Image (cartoon, rainbow, N blue to C red):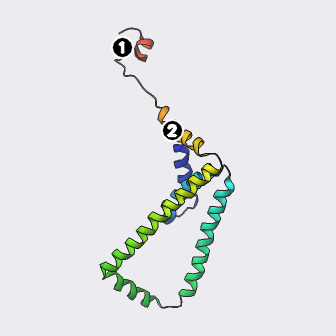
Amino acid sequence: MKAALVLSGLLFGCMHMNFNQFLYTCVFGMILVFMMEATGSIVTSMICHFLLNLNGVLLSGLNGSIRNASVSDAVQQSSNLASQPKILLAGLLVWGVIAVFTTAGGCAIWVHLARKNGRLELIQQKMNEAKRERIITPTPCDRNGISSRIYGSL
C-alpha cells in the first residue's frame, strides 16, 4: 500500500503539470488516498478536491478585488516587513502553530472516519503487510542457501 500511496501522490502532482504546485499537490494526492481508504469511497476524496479548488477560486477573486493597490505599494510593504525579522519570526510562529493544530485536527478526523466506516484495522493491516513481505536473499557462499541447491554442494 505504501508504494501505491506514493505513486498515486506522484502521479497526482505530475498531472497538474505545474512545477510550482508539484510538492503540495503530491502531498495532497497522498492525503486523498488516505481519505479514500478511510471511507471506502472515492466521493470523499472528490469533495476534498472540490473544496480545495473552491478555496483557490475564492482567494483568486479576493486577490482581484485587492489588486487595485499599486505594485509599488506592495513592494514597499514587503521590503518593510523583510527589514523587521521579529515580525517575520512572529508570522512564522503563528503559521507554524496553525499548521500543527490543523494537521492534528485533520488526523483526528481521518481516524474518526476510518473507525466509523470500520476500515481502521484494514488500513493498519495493509500498512503492516510491507513489513512482513521482506525478501531475504542468501549470499552465494551460503552453505544451505540457494546456491547449494542450484549448483550442488561447493
Front residue (pair 151, 55): 55
Up/down of 139 relative to 6, above or below: above
Give above or below for 88 relative to 42.
Answer: below
State which quarter of the image contains the C terminus.
Answer: top left
Residue at the spot 36% in from the left edge and 17% down from the top edge: 142
Q: Which residue is mark 2?
A: 128
Q: Position of residue 149 (x, y in %)?
A: 44, 12
Residue 71: mark in rendering: none
Q: Disc 1 and disc 2: Cα gap in Å?
A: 32 Å
- Residue at the location (57% across, 82% down)? 62
Callout 2 secondary element:
helix
Number of numbered markers: 2
Quadrant hosting residue 123:
top right
In the rendered image, residue 40, in percent from the top left (x then y), is placed at 66, 49
Name which residue lies at 52% across and 36% down. 129
Residue occupying the point 59% across, 52% down: 33
Can residue 12 be spotted in the picture? no
Residue type at mark 1 is: Arg
Residue denoted by label 1: 143
